[in-house]
Amino acid sequence: MRWPKALLLLLICAPSWAAEGWVLGGRVDMDSADGVAGLVFGDLAINDTTSVYGSFGKSSVPLPRGLDISTAYGDIGVDHWFGPIGVRAELAYWGDSDFLDSIDARGALYWRGERATLTLDLQYRDFEFDILRSDFRAGRDIRFHSTGAGIKASFGLTDAVTLSASGIDYDYNVNLSRGANRDIADFLSASRLSLVNSLISYRVGAGIGVDIGTRRLGIDHYVWEGEVAGSKTRSSTLSFLTPVSTRTDLQFGIGIDDADDYDAITFFSIQLFVYGGT
């Protein structure tokens, strides 16, 4: 429907740019609600202060009434650090062109010190929702948008222990509550991989990371509220990062999502990181 051709072109051309260093990787997510997603990503350091990055992925989530929704995701961004202030700008697409998709613009201003980082995040999401009727009534399109503002911080207690916290709040220009938009509510899912479940009012969380030699153990806890259902989800994740070669890391994650409207579901993720360049 609205795939940004410029974004796709940048994702294709970015690996050909001259770079001082790079990271390539892939991620697979699965959950007990039968949701599954795959993602490939890359980050290219153009010089000591500037990098470009991008990713592309797909997900599949079963819905009530025996439906399955497949969505595509892609983003491209640039990061420049002036020292100690830095900026990031991103453009992203997420959705199913026959159902619901969004084009997202994101910006960030951050300060980075020796042990601490503080970031201000701003987002704008432009949605298009296509409602196809099966009862001989005319279909309709809904266009709406949201703006988000958030802050996140990390602080190194020691050389091996890092604390982090974040929060973001979203404002929508239409009423997306379950009662006002039954058509959207019909596509809610227990899986966090659903695009509709990304329509949230707010999200807050905190975590701790501990280095154990060359390995890293992380524990994170987040709470968010859905804009459509109005229910809260509490999520806890345990992650473990370990090197498998001099230029390759593997990270495993396991956790649980406990939502007001659904039974608790478990999820699992695995990520591969490959490092190159100078």
Image: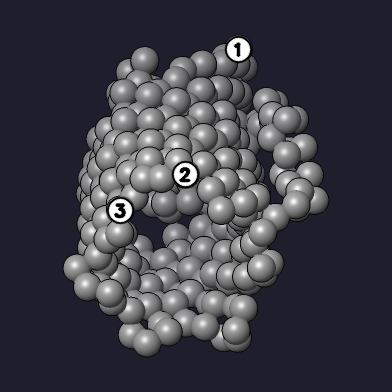
Within 10 Å of disc 2 (Cα), the crowding (few <14, some 14-19, many 20+) is: some
Rounded to the nearest whole Å, what is the CA distance between mark 2 and mark 3? 12 Å
* Viewer-nearest of discs 1 and 2: 2
124 is higher (above) or lower (below) than 15 = above
Q: Which mark is residue 128?
A: none
The quadrant the C terminus occupies is: bottom right
Q: Which residue is mark 1?
A: 138
Q: Measuring 55% from the left and 22% from the top, which residue is drawn there?
A: 128
From the viewer's perspective, is 123 left or right of 14?
left
User: Who's the residue at 29% across and 70% down the image?
Assistant: 209
Question: Which residue is labeled 3 in the image?
Answer: 113
Is residue 224 shown above or below 3?
below
Which circle's residue, 3 or 1, is located before the other in the chain?
A: 3
Does residue 25 appear to the left or right of 198 in the view shown?
right
Q: Position of residue 129 (x, y in %)?
A: 54, 24
Q: Residue at x 68, y 67 (%)?
A: 277
Residue name at image x 47 percent, y 27 percent: 125
The reply, left or right, for residue 215 in relation to residue 79 is: left
Determine which residue is flagged by label 2.
Answer: 81
Determine the secondary structure under disc 1: loop
Give the mark, 1 or 2, whose residue is nearer the N terminus: 2
**Amino acid residing under circle 2:** Trp
Is residue 59 among what the camera can see? no
**Is label 2 in a helix, a strand or a loop?**
strand
